[in-house]
Image: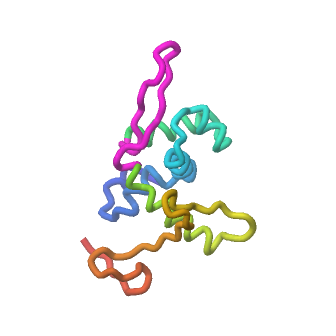
């Protein structure tokens, strides 16, 4: 895949996937939303090789999804926190999870709960302009 060509594509899905289409990157964002910020914690949670994690964190930081912050000078240590763009990715994670629950479910699955209400979160994507649930109306693409 030629990432440079895709990142110039007019399709926003193609542009997003040009740097985010890797499952490790999405799982790093999942963990970041759960409060993980440090390299060793990501590595332990994901069971990811340090070289792969280093590369994925670098891309997510360069693309402005995560922000790198120094938490120790001696020895120098950084943590990774969600930027505004990273925070905006939470609904995408929930929609991926909802699709996975429906089409890749079976067995014991993690559930997500609203911390205030205590109810299970069941995401639904809707079109802001029409209020229609996505997937219930025909779509067309254009620039």
Query: Which quadrant would residue 64 be assigned to in this image?
Result: top left
Give percent across and percent down for residue 31. Answer: 55, 47
- Residue 104 magenta-drawn? no
Q: Please, which residue is most extreme toward the left here?
A: 143
Quarter that holds the C terminus = bottom left
Residue shown at 54% from the left, 33% from the top: 38
The extreme right residue here reads 107
Instruction: Give how far across and how far down residue 4 sits, in percent.
Output: 37, 49
Q: Is residue 60 above or below residue 74?
A: below
Which residue sits at x=44%, y=81%? Answer: 135
Residue at left 68%, top 63%? Answer: 109
Question: Vertical placement of 143 versus 32: above or below?
Answer: below
Q: How many marks?
A: 0
Q: Residue furthest bottom?
A: 137
**Residue drawn at (59%, 33%), measured in percent from left and top?**
51
Query: In this picture, which residue range is highlighted in magenta?
Result: 63-86
Left or right? Give the position of 69 relative to 23. Answer: left
The answer to which of 15 and 29 lies nearer the viewer is 29
Q: Quadrant of residue 108?
A: bottom right
Location of residue 27 with respect to 98 vertically, above or below: above
Residue 85 is one of the magenta-drawn residues: yes
Residue 36 is situated, as x and y percent measured from the top left of the image, at 54, 40
- Tell me the colour scheme of the image: rainbow
Q: Position of residue 40 (x, y in %)?
A: 61, 32
Q: Residue furthest top?
A: 74
């Amino acid at each position: 895949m030629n990432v440079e060509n895709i990142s110039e594509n007019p399709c926003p899905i193609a542009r997003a996937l040009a740097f985010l289409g890797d499952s490790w990157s999405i799982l790093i964002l999942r963990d970041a939303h759960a409060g993980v910020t440090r390299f060793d914690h990501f590595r332990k949670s994901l069971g990811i090789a340090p070289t792969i994690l280093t590369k994925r964190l670098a891309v997510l930081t360069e693309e402005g999804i995560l922000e790198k912050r120094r938490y120790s000078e001696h020895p120098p240590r950084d943590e990774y926190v969600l930027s505004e763009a990273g925070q905006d990715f939470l609904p995408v994670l929930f929609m991926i999870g909802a699709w996975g629950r429906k089409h890749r479910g079976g067995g014991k699955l993690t559930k997500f709960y609203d911390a205030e209400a205590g109810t299970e979160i069941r995401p639904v994507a809707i079109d802001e302009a029409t209020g229609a649930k996505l997937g219930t109306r025909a779509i067309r693409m254009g620039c």
